[in-house]
Image (spheres, grey):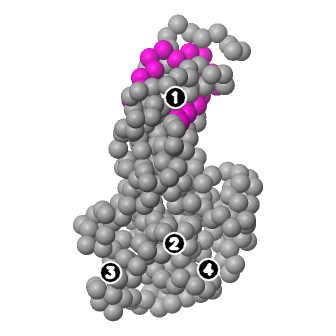
Amino acid sequence: MSATATAAGGRAMVNVFDGTRLLYSDANQILITVMDGNVVSRGFQKKASIFFPDLPFFDNLGDNYTFLASADGYKDAGFVPVKINPKIVQTVNLMLLPKSNSLNFFNATWDKLGEAKPTAKALFAKGAADDGAAAARYSDLEDTNDGEILACLLNITTAMDQIQLPQGTVLDYFKAVIWDLQGDSAMARDRFYAWADPALISQVERAKVQGEFADAPHGLHPGATRSYKQIAFGEANVQLTFHENDKLMIDGVNCIKIEPDIDYYRDPGAHLLLEVAVNAFGSLTDPRMVYVLRWIAGQRAGIPEFNPLYTIQKS
């Protein structure tokens, strides 16, 4: 190490969860790796919660730690940076996703949606002839593309409902979802299209001044006129892409088309090279990975738990 550690060590509590958002309980042991540039600790753990009481502390950039978790049959998870300090215990919550998994929508049915997410349910019902038609339209997505489109819809709407603007949340400005499964505005496992109150643009502009959003390139979105990306987290930020030339009158509001999605990475270079390049070869952003990254990022940010109602279970 390039610097000498001080006597007082840093402390961290690592908790490992699975795709059900409950503490990991599989029989396979968890390999936890802790690094400050060098490997500080690496070993198998039988418990899902592990306390590290005396991590080397330098009072410089060497205190930005990386925590990684892995287990047989699961995809690796980690978070960086975690700045340790002897005065506080850093809590690091990670999620291990089973490599062989299935989406469970038991708690995301139409009947349960109204109590858990009334704003989202009202949005999803818009434009349907009656509640039965809305329920059928929504429920059909569970059987479309192995449920990935429904998972995407729940991921993005849940995230937007957590983004506070100067007035209301992002989701408050959405007026209707476009339920097409084919064509230029088709729902997919990485995005959907909707109609939104154009007042959302001024709200996002104000949030940009406050450092919550940044301008994002919109050239990769055909027909788009502008785009903004949330910059609150290192990963899994919401991007709002506006198609201001496409309009529809809804409830007396001349709405504009909007295309929300969630990228894996905040850094534009990483997004362009790693995610867009992968998408170009036919593998769109996976809603399962968005689920994991957004949950971990929210845990580190100390915001209410990211709960899109569905869970990911081991097959």
As helix, strand or loop, the secondary structure at mark 1 comes to strand
In whole angstroms, how far apart are the C-alphas of marks 3 and 4? 28 Å
User: Which residue is located at x 68 percent, y 64 percent?
Assistant: 279
Residue 239 in magenta stretch: no
As helix, strand or loop, the secondary structure at mark 4 comes to strand
Using a 10 Å C-alpha cutoff, classify the residue at mark 4 as few (fewer than 14 neighbours), some (14 to 19) or many (20 or more): many
Determine contact: label 2, label 1, CB under 8 Å.
no
Identified by mark 2, the residue type is Asn
As helix, strand or loop, the secondary structure at mark 3 comes to helix
**17, 270: nearer the viewer:** 17
Label 4 or label 1, whichever comes before in sequence order:
1
Label 4 or label 2, whichever comes before in sequence order:
2
In whole angstroms, how far apart are the C-alphas of marks 3 and 2? 18 Å
Residue 144, percent from left and from top: 48, 75
**What residue sits right under mark 2 in the picture?**
145
Determine contact: label 3, label 4, CB under 8 Å.
no
**What residue sits right under mark 1 in the picture?**
32
**Residue extent of the magenta highlight:** 49-70
